[in-house]
């Protein structure tokens, strides 16, 4: 993602919104499939994976918290590179205010829920804070810059078609 920062700034400076749109949707679209597979593994087999890796039921008990935090990270992935786009298009102060607000929300909410809901409540507060930051930056990119930074389902379908053609060609060659 960091590699794209230069391209984002370059296309923004030139005013080439079409290329900028393509570049910023490429990253979350390409990362979506493996991320959702890993997310599904965490949801359905996370407890067994934690036990296998760490060998202790103590770590296995962290499975629900891991799932909650994974939801927040999936929200970040779906938001794409909206934060990087805002940073590279002279909107860094907006990013700073959104990040500050969402972090304060997560910390204050965590303090309020930790006694009643424990670590799961804290994880939910931070997952919501992360998701809120992502959604806010998506909207700012969309309405301020006219750029959509989320996953492009058309691109996913096109990638699926390209993969199917590649696999068919490979089968013919073997």
Image (cartoon, rainbow, N blue to C red):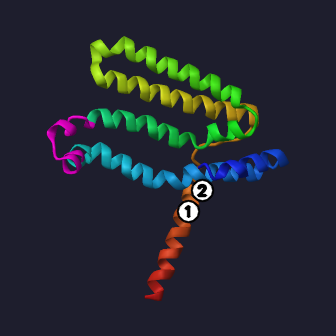
With 99 as the anchor, is 54 left or right in this view?
left
Residue marked by disc 1: 159
| Magenta part of the chain | 50-63
Label drawn at residue 16: none
With 45 as the anchor, is 31 left or right in this view?
right
| Quarter of the rendering containing residue 108 | top left
Q: Residues within 10 Å of mark 2 (few under 14, many from 20)?
A: some
Q: Residue at x 28, y 12 (%)?
A: 115
Q: Position of residue 91 (x, y in %)?
A: 73, 31
Q: Position of residue 90 (x, y in %)?
A: 76, 34
Q: Is residue 138 above or below residue 103?
A: below
Q: Residue at x 57, y 31 (%)?
A: 135
Q: Is residue 54 magenta?
A: yes
Which of the two residues, 159 or 38, is positioned nearer the viewer here? Answer: 38
User: Which element type, helix, strand or loop, lies under badge 2?
Assistant: helix
Q: Position of residue 61 (x, y in %)?
A: 20, 35
Which of the two residues, 46 or 163, is positioned nearer the viewer here? Answer: 46
| Image quadrant in which the C terminus is located | bottom left
Q: Give the residue at the far bottom of this rendering.
A: 174
Q: Residues within 10 Å of mark 1 (few under 14, many from 20)?
A: some
Q: Residue at x 26, y 45 (%)?
A: 46
User: Which element type, helix, strand or loop, lies under badge 1?
Assistant: helix
Q: Is residue 91 above or below residue 9?
A: above
Q: Is residue 161 magenta?
A: no
Q: Are marks 1 and 2 in contact (CB under 8 Å)?
A: yes
Residue marked by disc 2: 155
Q: Position of residue 85 (x, y in %)?
A: 68, 41
Q: Main secondary structure of the magenta part?
A: helix
Q: Residue at x 75, y 46 (%)?
A: 9
Q: Give the residue at the far right of this rendering.
A: 14
């Amino acid at each position: 993602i960091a590699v794209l920062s230069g391209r984002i700034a370059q296309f923004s400076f030139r005013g080439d919104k079409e290329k900028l749109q393509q570049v910023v949707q490429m990253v979350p679209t390409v990362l979506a499939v493996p991320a959702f597979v890993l997310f599904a593994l965490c949801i359905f087999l996370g407890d067994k994976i934690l036990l296998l890796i760490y060998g202790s039921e103590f770590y296995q008990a962290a499975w629900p918290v891991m799932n909650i935090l994974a939801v927040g990270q999936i929200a970040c992935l779906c938001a794409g590179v909206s934060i990087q786009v805002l940073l590279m298009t002279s909107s860094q102060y907006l990013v700073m205010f959104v990040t500050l607000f969402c972090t304060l929300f997560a910390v204050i909410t965590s303090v309020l829920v930790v006694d009643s809901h424990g670590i799961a409540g804290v994880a939910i507060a931070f997952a919501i804070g992360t998701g809120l930051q992502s959604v806010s930056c998506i909207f700012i990119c969309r309405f301020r810059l006219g750029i959509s930074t989320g996953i492009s389902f058309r691109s996913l379908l096109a990638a699926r078609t390209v993969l199917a053609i590649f696999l068919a060609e490979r089968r013919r060659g073997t």
